[in-house]
Image (cartoon, rainbow, N blue to C red):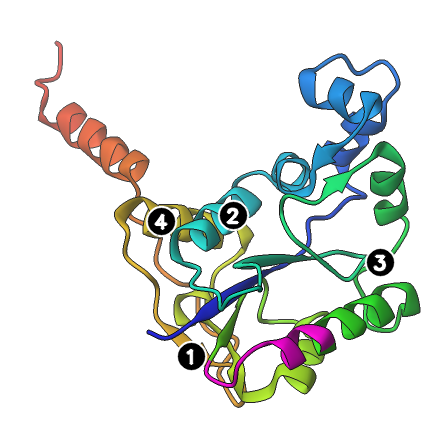
Amino acid sequence: MGPRIFLLSPAHCGGKRASLLLRGEARFDLALRLRAGRVELGELFTFVSGLYFRGKLAYASAFAQPPAGVPGALVITSDRGLLPPHAPLTLDDLVACAQVRVDLAERRYREPLARDVELLAAALPPACDVVLLGSIATGKYFDLLLDIIGDRLRFPVDFVGRGDMSRGALMLEAARRGEELVYVPAAGALRTGGRAPGVDTAGARAARARRAAGRGRPRSR
């Protein structure tokens, strides 16, 4: 494979987990550090989104091959365009993020994202692929990315038919094994399909082993 970078879809900053960080009485470590100063975007979005964002970060870290001067991973945000995972965010930044919908009809989301994607597309060499790690079934960022990046936009074909948690587990397992997923061009691709099979993680294999052991035990009388 040639050079490639990853675009990570945004976490939902208006959900229940994000609200925990905004509570003044919260005393867990991340909330205290966020109120005291700044927290890296990747850590913050991992808390808000859980397994899904953790999988995206691990996968991008394992397989990015960026050209010189370009980050290997950039995160789509609701109000600040594209940011690297190590970008610092404040409590006020989280509040502002939560107030903007990830919807192309929302100017505060669309304009910063279009600006940054255009700058990125101009900075990348023609042979560099841009791989979207996010939802492909809706157009809330897919359509804008495809319009600007065009034929260089790719996504993992195994994302078709999977929800957020399944995609997160898939990426974590791929990163753990060091086995990169197969990418397909976004233009003209099939983006929806039947439900994909479960991910064969270590936890899934352990659960099957426990069930098999339980079936093998003699029943007490």
Is residue 216 visible to us here?
A: yes
Q: How far apart are the alpha carbons under marks 1 and 4?
A: 19 Å
Which comes sooner in the sequence, label 2 or label 1?
2
Per the rendered image, the range of residues in magenta is 119-127
**Numbered circle sitting on residue 57:** 2
Quarter of the figure with the N terminus: bottom left
Label 2, label 1: how far apart the Cα atoms are: 20 Å
**Mark 4 secondary-structure assignment:** helix
Q: Disc 3 marks which residue?
A: 101
Kindly report the distance in space between the C-alpha atoms of the residues bearing marks 3 and 2: 22 Å
Residue at 48% x, 65% y is 66
Q: Classify the position of the C terminus by image quarter.
A: top left
- Choose the circle earlier in sequence order: 2 or 4: 2
Kindly check if marks 2 and 4 are in contact, taking CB atoms under 8 A apart as contact. no
Residue receiving disc 1 = 184
Q: Secondary structure at mark 2?
A: helix
